[in-house]
Amino acid sequence: MDKKEIAELMVSWAKEAKILVDAGLKQDLGVKEKTGARDLVTVLDGQLERFYRSQIKKYFPNDRILGEEGQGDQAQSLEGAVWIIDPIDGTLNFVKQRAHYVTMLARYVDGVGQVGLIYGLDTGQSLLALAQEGAYLNGQPLNLERQQALADVSLDQVLMSTEALPLDGDLGLYQLSKASLGLRIFGCAGLDVVHLALGRTGLYLNHLYPWDNAVALILADLCGFKLTDFQGQPLNLLDRQYVLMAYPKIHDQVLNYLKKRR
């Protein structure tokens, strides 16, 4: 099965997931805290992950899976074909706002991203990434003129976004945000990545898990932004890390800023 066929499967699964979520909104969500009041999980998070796992095993029986909710065996390495999935990203938004939440799926082969999808479970908007082929917004090839124009742009010319990092902490993110055009907090890593990939923002900083980064890594190569840890090193997709995503000149600026703060 080629990348386009896999992408079509992903989108079809996400559309089914949206139907499940829309129906689930009429029922008790069974909301529980994971690590605190800001980190929630619902019955639908688990239901969607189990649905994705069943579909993956149906079409790709030998592939392994790394999912946020751990609804089955978890891949312990990136050898071979591995799916990295986040059934509902932005669960707090989902519970409190009924808006601004997505589902994310990515397939990697021997540690290299092949296909990724960020799909709005509230809007039905899709952003597909096919490695070495292109990015697609709602099925149409993504026009990259805006992203290409950001390659040599400085922080003072763009909006930035962050979350899960204290603005008044040692990193001095409040001071950094004052050097940009403004700070945005979307409450959903997938939406932060969408805004960055579409050139609506130029910088995104956060403390993220593999399922938050998997699609972004594929999009970075296609859209021209850089994605590293706070030391400028490549990410380890099996660990949670502090992540810097930005267009090239801004990425260098922020790395230098963070180095001075350490």
Image (cartoon, helix red, strand yellow):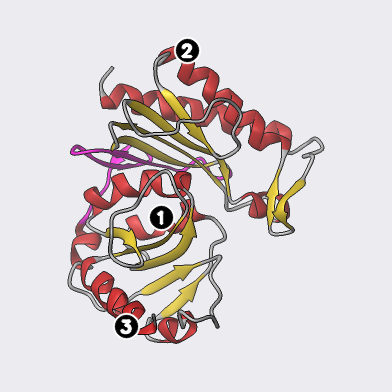
Q: Which residue is mark 3?
A: 156
Quadrant assignment for the C terminus: bottom left
Indicate the amino acid at tag 2. Lys
Residue 180 on image: x %, y %: 38, 81
Instruction: Give the residue drawn at x 46%, y 49%.
Output: 212
Indicate the amino acid at tag 1. Val
Indicate the amino acid at tag 3. Asp
Q: Residues within 10 Å of mark 2 (few under 14, many from 20)?
A: few
Report the front residue among 176 and 125. 176
Q: Which contiguous range is marked in magenta?
A: 122-144
Tags 3 and 1 in contact by the CB under 8 Å rule? no
Report the front residue among 73 and 156. 73
Q: Earlier in the sequence, mark 1 or mark 2?
A: 2
Tags 3 and 2 in contact by the CB under 8 Å rule? no
Secondary structure found at label 3 = helix
Name the side, left or right, on which 83 lies relative to 53: left
Question: In the picture shown, does residue 235 fall above or below 250?
Answer: above
Q: Which residue is mark 1?
A: 193
In space, the residues marked 1 and 2 are separated at their CA atoms by: 29 Å
Q: Which residue is outermost to the right?
A: 28
